[in-house]
Amino acid sequence: MRIAHVITRLIVGGAQENTLLCCQELIQRHGDEVLLITGPAIGPEGSLLEEATAREIPVTIIPSLRRPVHPWHDLLSYRRLKSALHEFQPQVVHTHSAKGGILGRMAASSLRVPVVVHTVHGAPFHDYQNALSRNLIRLCEQFAATRCHAMVSVADAMTDQLVQARVAPREKFSTIYSGLQVGPFLDAEIHREATRLQWGYAPQHIVVGKLARLFELKGHQYLIDAAPSIVEKFPDIRFLFVGDGILRQQLQQQIDRLGLREYFQFTGLVEPARVPSLLSAMDMLVHTSLREGLARALPQALLAGRPVISYDIDGAREVVIPGKTGILLPPRSVEELSDSVIQLAQDASLRTTLARAGQRLCEQRFHYQFMAQQLRQLYLDLLPAQGS
């Protein structure tokens, strides 16, 4: 098949890694002709453009395709998207992210591409936006949903949210979990000793990790707020923040005000290939984001044999099953977060039990080859229905 994927930015992030793995698998395993269309990889998160080149994925960059709303840039992007698709002549167009998803579906629909699919990696409208922005984005998504044949959610929770918002009927959705290269995470333990030595952790230290960009709604401040009571009861605790972003200075100032500098470390921006080794240094992962589709950090940690404490948001409960693979907490809770970290810190047997169950749950469900196989079958199922 000839398949075009469209995404707004090829930055370091879950949706982008998912898209690269899908493109790679379609090319290498199925022999499909694939084109990845994207805007410039602008932002502090880092770029995956070199990764796409290394994987021999053809990429077309549209310079005007940017995340912020800009009428002139958006009109220009639409025209260039339409031109690129017209030249490539795909049978399938698969879009990702808000801006790329809306403009990509409009362009593909106007060209009468036989199959148009959109993946919802996270609802683009949410309760933390002002009402005007939220309603405008919801209306745009409702319009764009009429310009595609199917929608893929990375978690059942995404489908529920968009159906409730009347973006599209439930029968238009399928859930296909976001794929990972599971092997490096299953083998993460071999890096533990060297990685802990690199970061200065002693054998008695219990390392609490958080894997997320240092951005709004990622919830780092709640873990910092919980830290004083954790440190008071468990002085051997240490905290490792993996990632970078605009809030780094603000978070470091919050830590300094609490007098906890010696307990926290920041890795800064890391390449995706380093994530398994960093997870190996941890004893648990804490996920305090307030908004995610289904954060890749959750299955990544479980695959690496690390139990998870997560706020109960969006798709988290589909992998963090209370009492089986981890602990779920109310969003923004601090006292419950502190108690849960202390509970796991004091109980190595519980950490092991939760992590092993998580590995079993995630090993096939989040394998990128399984994801690509499901997506390709969706394309094939849709093609006859569209008379192609």
Image (spheres, grey):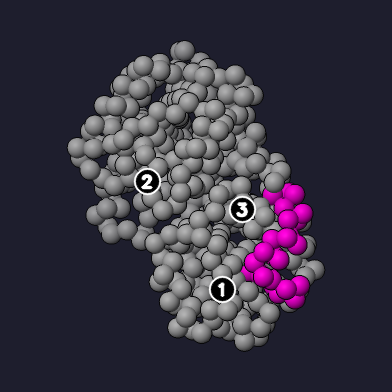
- Please tell me which of labels 1 and 3 falls first in the chain: 1
Residue range (magenta): 185-208
**Quadrant assignment, res 267:** bottom right
- Crowd band around label 2 with a 10 angstrom C-alpha radius: few (<14), some (14–19), many (20+): few
Q: Quadrant of residue 263?
A: bottom right
**Foreground residue, 176 or 14?**
14
The answer to whether 334 appears left or right of 348 in the picture is: left
Q: Residue furthest left?
A: 72
Q: Residues within 10 Å of mark 1 (few under 14, many from 20)?
A: some
Sequence order check, earlier mark of 3 and 2: 2
User: Which residue matches tag 2?
Assistant: 42
Q: Is residue 6 visible?
A: yes
Indicate the position of residue 375 as horizontal and vertical percent values.
56, 30
Pointer 3 residue? 275
Identify whether 244 is placed above or below 334.
Answer: above
Q: Secondary structure at mark 3?
A: helix
Q: Secondary structure at mark 1?
A: strand
Residue of label 1: 264
Question: For the residues marked 2 and 1, what is the alpha-carbon distance in whole angstroms?
Answer: 28 Å
Measuring 29% from the left and 43% from the top, which residue is drawn there?
139
Q: Three-letter amino acid code at disc 3? A: Val
The answer to the question of whether label 3 and label 2 lie on touching residues, with beta carbons closer than 8 A, is: no
Q: Position of residue 172 (x, y in %)?
A: 46, 34
